[in-house]
Image (cartoon, helix red, strand yellow):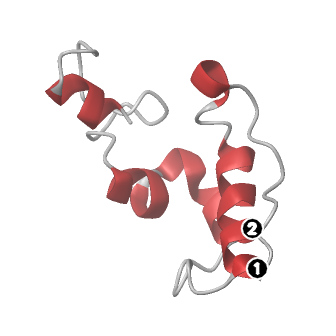
């Protein structure tokens, strides 16, 4: 996320490239960025990492926003580890 890259000198600005209004922190990306509101509305973020089903929902959110496509390519479907 740009705030982190800015802090380590890898980005000229910490500002979110989607909304252009706030530093792109993890909190901003997951909870506040208006550019991702539609994707966020399809996802309940409470207790997100409590189960494999919820982690799959997080991956769906990240895929829907396409935030990491440029650097990492499309995120694959999440394949949970064997229990």
Location of residue 35 (image quadrant): top right
Query: Is there any visible trace of residue 42 in the rendered image?
Result: no
Query: Is there any visible trace of residue 5 in the rendered image?
Result: yes
Q: Left of 30 or right of it: where is 80?
A: right
Q: Nearer the viewer, residue 18 or 55?
A: 55
Kindly identify the residue that appears in the image at 58 percent across and 58 percent down: 37
Circles 1, 2 touching at the beta carbon (< 8 Å): yes
Residue 57 drawn at (x, y percent): 72, 69
Residue furthest front as drawn? 82
At label 1, counting other C-alpha atoms closer than 10 Å, the crowd grade (few under 14, some 14-19, many 20 or more) is few
- In the image, residue 50 above or below residue 67: below
Q: Nearer the viewer, residue 6 or 81?
A: 81
Q: Circle 2 — which element?
A: helix
| Disc number placed over residue 53 in the picture, else none | 1
Tell how many labels.
2
Kindly identify the residue that appears in the image at 76 percent across and 83 percent down: 83
Q: Left of 79 or right of it: where is 48?
A: left
Q: Nearer the viewer, residue 31 or 11?
A: 11
Quadrant where the image shows the N terminus:
top left
Kindly identify the residue that appears in the image at 31 percent across and 47 percent down: 25
Kindly identify the residue that appears in the image at 28 percent across and 26 percent down: 5
Residue 52 drawn at (x, y percent): 72, 78
Q: Circle 1 — which element?
A: helix
Q: Which residue is mark 2?
A: 56
- In the image, residue 3 above or below residue 59: above
Q: How far, Cα to Cα, is label 1 from label 2?
A: 5 Å
| Disc number placed over residue 76 in the picture, else none | none
Residue 29 drawn at (x, y percent): 44, 51
- In the image, residue 36 above or below residue 54: above
Residue 62 drawn at (x, y percent): 65, 50
Q: Left of 54 or right of it: where is 30?
A: left
């Amino acid at each position: 996320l740009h705030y982190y890259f800015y802090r380590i000198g890898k980005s000229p600005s910490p500002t979110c490239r989607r909304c252009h209004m706030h530093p792109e922190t993890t909190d901003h990306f997951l909870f506040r960025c208006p550019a991702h509101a539609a994707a966020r509305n399809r996802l309940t973020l409470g207790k997100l990492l409590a189960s494999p089903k919820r982690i799959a929902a997080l991956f769906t959110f990240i895929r829907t926003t396409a935030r990491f496509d440029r650097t990492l390519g499309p995120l694959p479907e999440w394949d949970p580890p064997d229990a």
